[in-house]
């Protein structure tokens, strides 16, 4: 169950700086609160510090969650995992504040009309409205703390992100990983010759406190997407492996669904899904080898068993993922579809997977010739 607060015309609370606390009281409508999603405004500026949300009950602070302010985008809805057991009908409070935040560059929260019985405060002042947020009740299974890499019996997921000159998109990508319901993961960012690798490293480092395990590797010179992915794979230690492009937003249950699909299909080497690509939705479809030999309908953003990974062909400029799926099939391995749409990515030129020096048809012809296809 989801309960929305502050709907309707939205206004701004003012900058969330050290010493100012935004408070929203609410009546628990279920016995477990999984998370709260809050809408922020940034005006596209760089934000310093950490944004922290606390759940407060009659006996004091019950749960706390935070994020790095610099990852927030303008009009971004950020999800804070609280995972607390409540007493239905009891009054509680969420408190939104910041640490190490600088006045003039702090994020701003949104609020709107009042529709519930709670109260909305900024500092000591009461407002006739509600913080623009959504309370998520009883949606997700209670799990072992996300910071534990060994606590999940389902297995560790190694996430490899190749990056090239799109640091702002990388922030949003990492933020989508921080919101995953499946928390047993390690994240490996491989920079493939960006103009400012130190800045990329700083962005990755900012997620150290909110992702279970994040690593950074700079290759120095540009070697291409397949090389960056292969390097990242050598650093991986998880049971499962997924390559996520730096401009991708993974939906919050994506890893949970990928792992569950592989758990339910023990013979499958990898699991794939549908996705949103710019204005288009690529719908999920069942695995069909004959169709795969004609064209690629499986995205790079698919989760495989790490032991099945055979490496990307670093001589290919495009369609490295299609080549990998065909290579796996020639070695007796196949994929399974989750049946869901689990991520979105923009259509853009200059991505790490694109190469303007070779056309799509020519690239397809090279892959077909390699695998003896017409």
Image (cartoon, rainbow, N blue to C red):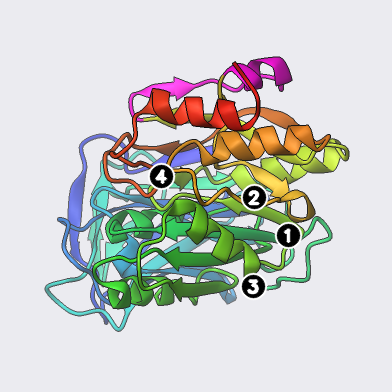
Q: Are marks 4 and 1 in contact (CB under 8 Å)?
A: no
Q: Nearest to the eye among marks 4 and 1: give it.
A: 4
**Rendered image quadrant of residue 294:** top right
Query: Are dots 1 and 2 in contact, CB under 8 Å?
Result: no
Q: Are marks 4 and 3 in contact (CB under 8 Å)?
A: no
The residue that disc 2 covers is 88
Q: What residue would you read off at disc 4?
A: 353
Query: Badge 4, how many Cα within 10 Å: few under 14, some, many 20+?
Result: some
**Category of crowding for the residue at label 2, using alpha-carbon neighbours closer than 10 angstroms: few (below 14), some (14–19), many (at least 20):** few
Tell me if I can see residue 49 in this picture.
Answer: no
Indicate whether residue 289 is drawn in magenta.
Answer: yes
Counting from the top left corner in percent of width and height, residue 30 is at 64, 46
Residue at 41 percent across and 44 percent down: it is: 353
Mark before the other along the chain sequence, 1 or 2: 2
- Give the residues in magenta: 278-294
Label 4 to label 3: alpha-carbon separation: 31 Å
Which circle, 1 or 3, is nearer the viewer? 3
Q: Position of residue 116 (x, y in %)?
A: 40, 42
Residue at mark 1 to residue at mark 2: CA–CA distance: 21 Å
Q: Residues within 10 Å of mark 1 (few under 14, many from 20)?
A: few
Return the disc, 3 or 2, that comes first in the chain's sequence: 2
Query: What's the distance in space between the residues labelled 4 and 2, CA to CA?
Result: 50 Å
């Amino acid at each position: 169950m989801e309960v929305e607060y502050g709907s309707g015309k939205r206004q701004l609370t003012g900058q969330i700086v050290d010493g100012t606390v935004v408070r929203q009281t609410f009546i628990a409508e279920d016995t477990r609160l999984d998370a709260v999603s809050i809408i922020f405004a940034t005006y596209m500026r760089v934000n310093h510090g950490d944004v922290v949300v606390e759940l407060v009950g009659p006996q004091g602070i019950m749960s706390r969650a935070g994020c790095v302010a610099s990852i927030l985008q303008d009009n971004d809805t950020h999800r804070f995992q609280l995972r607390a057991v409540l007493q239905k009908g009891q009054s509680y409070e969420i408190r939104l504040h910041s640490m190490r935040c600088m006045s003039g560059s702090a994020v701003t929260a949104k609020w709107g009309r009042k529709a519930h019985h709670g109260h909305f405060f900024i500092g000591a002042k009461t407002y006739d409205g509600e913080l623009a947020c959504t309370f998520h009740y009883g949606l997700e299974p209670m799990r072992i703390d996300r910071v534990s890499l060994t606590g999940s019996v389902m297995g560790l997921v190694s996430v490899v992100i190749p990056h090239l000159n799109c640091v702002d998109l990388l922030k949003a990508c990492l933020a989508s990983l921080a919101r995953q319901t499946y928390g047993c993961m390690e994240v490996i960012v491989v920079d493939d010759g960006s103009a400012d690798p130190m800045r990329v490293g700083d962005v990755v480092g900012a997620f150290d406190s909110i992702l279970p395990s994040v690593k950074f590797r700079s290759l120095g010179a540009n070697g291409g997407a397949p090389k960056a992915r292969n390097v990242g794979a050598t650093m991986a230690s998880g049971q499962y492996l997924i390559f996520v492009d730096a401009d991708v937003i993974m939906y919050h249950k994506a890893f949970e669904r990928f792992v569950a699909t592989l758990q339910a299909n023990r013979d499958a080497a990898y699991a794939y899904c549908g996705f949103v690509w710019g204005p288009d939705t690529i719908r999920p479809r069942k695995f069909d080898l004959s169709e795969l030999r004609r064209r690629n309908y499986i995205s790079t953003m698919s989760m495989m068993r790490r032991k099945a990974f055979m490496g990307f062909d670093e001589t290919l400029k495009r369609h490295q993922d299609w080549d990998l799926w065909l290579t796996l099939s020639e070695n007796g391995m196949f994929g399974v579809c989750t049946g869901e749409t689990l991520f979105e990515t923009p259509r853009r030129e200059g991505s790490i997977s694109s190469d303007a020096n070779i056309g799509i048809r020519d690239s397809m012809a090279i892959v077909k010739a390699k695998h003896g296809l017409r």
